Image (cartoon, rainbow, N blue to C red):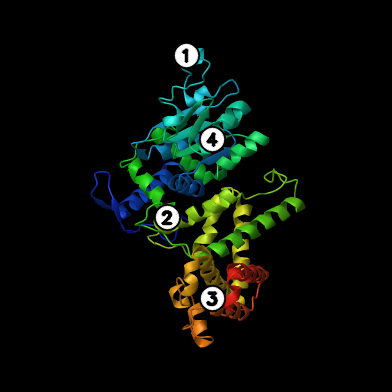
Amino acid sequence: MPETTTSVFAQVAPPSSPSRNGAARNTSAITSDLNDAIEFVRERVVNREEVIEQIFLAILIGEHVLLESRTGVGKTLLAEQVFRMFSGAQCFKVQASKEQQPDTYFGGLLLDELKQGRLIHNTEGSLVESEFGFIDEIFDANDYTLRALLSLLNERELIRGVQRMQSKVHTVIAATNYLRLSEITEALLDRFLFKALIHPDKDAFYQYKISQQYLKNLGNPIEPPNKIHYEDLAYATHIVRGEVPEYQIQTAPDLVYFMNLVVRHYEVQRNRLLQERPHESHLRTKDFYISPRTQAKSLDVLRAIAFLHGRNYAERADIPKLHLLLCTAGVAEEKALFQRSYDTLVQLYQASSAFDQLAALLTLEDVLARLRHDPTLMSKSIVEIEGAPTKRSLVTWAKETLGVADASAGHKRRLAEGFLQSIHPSTEDLKLLKAHLDQEIKVVFAGHAEHF
């Protein structure tokens, strides 16, 4: 995909990985296949670039997507066309209704077991044994059924009475014409980390393009010339989750810390907007909340973006693309607000050299964490303890001031305290971090007072 498009994906050449037959396969082929699939769906489903990118990103990290729109805008076509791009995977499809029971999704109950008072589902062909799922009009399902789906969607486990079994579910796309807010549906919404609001196309040009596609295919999904095998997708998912030791995508500590600051700033701004404009139709909750699980998944998204750009590290410029996870695709105001949160903090940190200060403070935090985890390091020189170097390296500072020859605990404490005091934070966030590290020094060296 050309660099000038809005896509987060790019043709790349990452390292090699095992193929299905055990031979080495260059993972650039997986990336190329993903980009081809995205382009194919973009051509088939007109003017839905952002939500298509969002869906493929969700599939890459193994999460679920909720599509909301009025009737007739092509939610079903979009979901079916995306799933049609993969082979070697089973796809479960259902239209929800209030009359349905959990066995619609888990398989019928075994009568012999039921006679014995046990609820055991025959899961063959059900959502439990499917890699992909499409649930149309999901909020038409009753709360009892939705509650039963929670563990399947989150833990990938069927839990019904005495029956417990692991599920094959990788990604579910759900569609709805409306949101039904309750305690149960709030929990369900948290399972769908990626959300999109799809607006009907009123632009004459896009209506013409949609008509052209309809004349070609009568509104049906079509078979792509090439498909991505599910095992290749699953391998890529393991990579972006950090589960492949030989292919680690690095996320530097200062990048992760700054990312969390941006996410928190965005959350505060969203809630401020809710307070100021509660009447607006798309602001439909009392408060905006980013759960710890969603914030943790931001790291998977960063690794996925890096992977798809041929890098084995995430970079600061990837952070604005988290709008695909943290914002509702199709709500331009949310995306713009997240971009402003990022721009505000970047400008603040660049203007005050705060990025260097953050890296230096986290260098000290890493050393303290190592000492706390392994007390035997107390007898070693600081040179043997410090991890990756930074512009404001603790070792460099030690050489310029106290020296590094003394390996005693007392020397290390004086070094840590002196290094911390040499940093004068330029933001409130960094002042708070410095205060935390001051307390951490006291905790780490508490048992070594006899050496001072």
Instruction: Tell me the residue that label 3 is attached to.
Output: 409
Nearer to us of marks 2 and 4 is 4
Q: Residue at x 53, y 16 (%)?
A: 117
Disc 2 to disc 4, C-alpha distance: 31 Å
Element at label 4? helix
Q: Nearer the viewer, residue 202 or 131?
A: 131
Mark 1 Cα shell of 10 Å, populated few (<14), some (14-19), many (≥20): some
Disc 3 to disc 1, C-alpha distance: 69 Å
Q: In the rendered structure, which amino acid carries the disc numbered 2?
A: Phe
Residue 223 % position (x, y) = 34, 36
Tell me which label, 1 or 4, sits earlier in the chain. Answer: 1
Disc ID at residue 111? 1
Q: Residue at x 52, y 72 (%)?
A: 363
Instruction: Tell me the residue that label 2 is attached to.
Output: 9
Element at label 2? loop
Instruction: Tell me the residue that label 4 is attached to.
Output: 151
Tell me which label, 2 or 4, sits earlier in the chain. Answer: 2
